[in-house]
Amino acid sequence: MNEKIRVMIGEDEVSKRIQEVADQINRDYEGRTLSLVCVLKGGVFFMCELAKRLKVPVTLDFMSVSSYGDDTKSSGVVKIVKDLDQPLEGKDVLVVEDIIDSGRTLSYLLRILKGRNPKSLKLCTLLDKPDRRVVDDAEVDYCCFVIPDEFVVGFGLDYMQLYRNLPYIGVVELDG
Ligand code: IMP
Ligand code: MG
């Protein structure tokens, strides 16, 4: 069986849109310091590209979570595999995600982070698949692209851990 990748959003378009979102964040957080929280591994490419375009002072921190459940459906109960290094208390926090799908993982994660008493807590995602939403209590503050219900890879997103390094967003097509 061969896998082919169809381009959904090209490299230039992704880059242009990240710049627009960064401009918005620069305006919204003017005069403040922003604590970026990246959810590994998917969020890492987006966080780097976003952070390079931010003019406000930023700190970067990372957390890794795994979802209890089977491979196809996240249960929404999240285990923290790697926690943040820095406390969030009193900080302006922006969570940077690759994609919001069912919303289960994120909803649980945001509850944990809120409990650490940040001054503000907002969410920035590269992609949003609203058709798949099951848990809708996580408001998306910044989103680069709303996409249809297709399984995408690239720009941090994987299919069986592969394709995270693609500089564009594509759809895996199986043939053969
Ligand atoms: P959920 O919102 O709890 O369902 O889980 C979202 C997570 O599932 C994301 O952070 C991704 O890691 C993964 N995911 C969801 N949709 C896709 C996709 O289209 N491609 C790759 N990973 C995806
Ligand atoms: Mg993710």
Image (cartoon, rainbow, N blue to C red):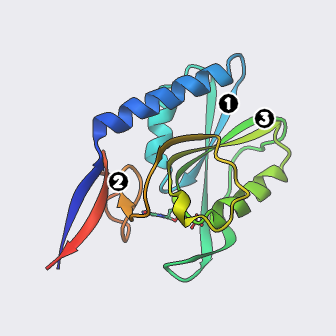
Above or below for 66 versus 117: below
Q: Nearer the N terminus, badge 2 or badge 1?
A: 1
Q: Is residue 90 left or right of residue 40?
A: right
Q: Residues within 10 Å of mark 1 (few under 14, many from 20)?
A: many
Badge 2 marks a residue whose secondary structure is: loop
Kindly report the distance in space between the C-alpha atoms of the residues bearing marks 2 and 3.
Answer: 31 Å
Task: Pick whichever of labels 1 and 3 is earlier in the sequence.
Answer: 1
Instruction: Report the number of discs.
Output: 3
Q: Residue at x 42, y 33 (%)?
A: 17
Viewer-side residue, 129 vs 27: 129
Tell me: is circle 3 under 8 Å from ligand 2. Answer: no
Would you call the spot at circle 3 few (<14 residues within 10 Å), some (14-19), or many (20 or more)?
some
Name the residue tied to disc 1: 34
In depth, the one of 52 and 4 nearer the eye is 4
Q: Work out whether mark 2 precedes mark 3 in sequence or the reverse, and give the earlier one.
A: 3
The amino acid type of the residue labelled 1 equals Leu
Which residue is at the front of the view, 129 or 107? 129
The structure residue drawn at horizontal position 71% and vertical position 39%, both measured from the top left corner, is 93
- Residue 61, above or below 115: above
Q: Residues within 10 Å of mark 2 (few under 14, many from 20)?
A: many
User: Residue 144's spot in the image, x, y percent?
Assistant: 48, 40
Q: Provide the secondary structure element on which disc 1 rests.
A: strand
Question: Residue at point 29% right, 39% down?
Answer: 11
Q: Give the quarter of the figure containing the C terminus.
A: bottom left
Q: Which mark is residue 91?
A: 3
Label 2 amino acid? Gly
The residue at which mark 2 appears reads as 154
Q: Residue furthest top?
A: 31
Could you tell me residue 170's position as x and y percent? 30, 55
Q: What is the three-letter code of the residue carrying label 3?
A: Lys
